[in-house]
Amino acid sequence: QLAAHYELNNLIAVLDANRLGQRGETMPGHHLEQYKNRFQAFGWNTYVIDGHNLGEILDAFSKARNSKQPVVIICKTFKGKGVSFLENKDGWHGKPVPKDQLENALKEIPDAAMPAVEIEKPKAQFIRAAEKKDAGFSSYKIGDLAATREAYGKALAQLALADGSVLAVDAEVSNSTFAEDVRKVKPEQFVECFVAEQNMIGMALGLASRGFVPFASTFAAFLSRAHDQIRMGALSSPPITVCGSHAGVSIGEDGGSQMGLEDIGMFRALPNSSVFYPSDAVSAEKLVHLAATLPGVKYIRTTRAKTPVLYDGKEQFKPGEFKVIRESSKDKAVLCGSGITLHEAVKAYDELKKEGIDVSVVDLFCIKPFNGKKFMDFAKKHGGKVIVAEDHYPEGGIGEMLSSALVNSGVEVQSLAVRKLPKSAKPEQLVAYEGIDGSSISLAAKKILRESRD
């Protein structure tokens, strides 16, 4: 449907309809009109042919060149064609011909030798290198209120203005992810994928293979729909960046169906992936610029709510690192957070400070990769006790990442995460309900310190 909407007349799909699936006949079988009707309903031109007739194949491709719409060539074929005991027979999926039957099979295949012709290999077509300029940065001031999703949009627009190969692809929520900022300044570098996250990721992967630098964005919760495309795409380490906005229970009243609570685990599990979770506008902007330079799948998790700017515009962010935003020589524990929970950790710091309890506060802006050795050394110097809060389910999340990094280190880790079924309420109510707010972090710190004294 998306291909027809954009009139992609250079797109030709070949459907091999051989009737058989893995365990038996498919639903349409050889009723090719069913395939034809379905594709035509979505605006494709269709050609139904005998897939074993070379003349019909060439004729279909010739006609497809003149189409104004995407084309599908529906080929009626027979699995095992030419071998009597294999042709159109069920039960052979994924099975090699037994040795005692191989000779008979080869005898039945006519003219088995390949024709003595040279086939020119297609040449890979990459986009012409776009002119690149240095991307600008926004001027945020410490204490300003700005949502990281807004900073994502501004940073992406800056990149698009500086580099014609940077593209924004979005699943019909660009006014919420702020990817629409690219459309406003460089409409030719913005692609609307509508509510079809699988198509969006597939498109981003294809664009990356042609030399573009795609940023795909939607709500974090909706990325689960495209997990298969993301998982398969990651096998080739494509240079794509995925942004999941509206993450966690902190989105508030929209409720559990809209809350991304599994996304960190999903992206952490991918080979050679990077996972970034900015807590303010400056870190969000810097991480967008960083992601554009890194290989493999990158994930940026953004927050719906506006949060105070924590960093000066000159601050640098590197893969695997973390930021210490509060510390002293008398610290008894380390409070860790990412995104919304970092600001809750700062609230806990202020509460504990009033009670004469010194702690440090760490921004885990990079979930993967992570310099566990460096963090372990820091934690040991600051009390050897860690309280980490995250707006995510515990499974696959930040707490599990830290616990894994600190295993057998002697550092004690207390993990606060979303453990109750999410509800619809105000953001501050939900953060407190799940026990990841400043008061909960403060209580957890006092509890772990009290237990260490007992």
Image (cartoon, rainbow, N blue to C red):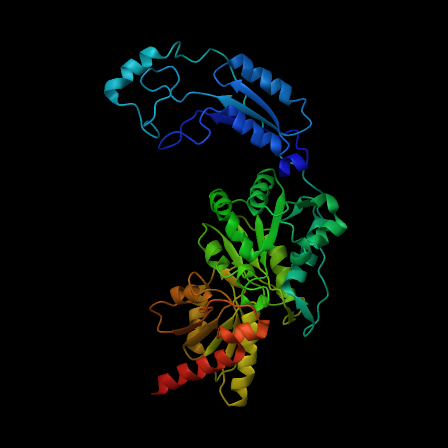
Quarter of the figure with residue 67:
top right
Quarter of the figure with residue 151:
bottom right
| Farthest top residue in view | 111
Q: Position of residue 248 (x, y in %)?
A: 54, 64
| Farthest left residue in view | 100
Evaluate whether residue 377 shows in this view. yes
Quarter of the figure with residue 452:
bottom left
Q: Residue at x 70, y 71 (%)?
A: 141
330 to 238, vertically: above or below: below
| Farthest right residue in view | 185
Does residue 450 appear to the left or right of 438 in the view shown? left
The one nearer the camera, 73 or 152, is 73
Q: Position of residue 244 (x, y in %)?
A: 57, 56
Q: Please state the total of marks drawn on the protein image.
A: 0
Q: Position of residue 61 (x, y in %)?
A: 59, 20
Q: Where is the N terminus found, in terms of image quarters?
A: top right
377 to 186, vertically: above or below: below
189 to 321, vertically: above or below: above
Q: Residue at x 60, y 53 (%)?
A: 218
Q: Position of residue 372 (x, y in %)?
A: 43, 65
Does residue 91 appear to the left or right of 68 in the view shown? left
Evaluate whether residue 134 shows in this view. no
Does residue 308 appear to the left or right of 344 in the view shown? right
The one nearer the camera, 98 or 89, is 89
Q: Where is the C terminus found, in terms of image quarters?
A: bottom left
273 to 326, vertically: above or below: above
The one nearer the camera, 174 or 326, is 174
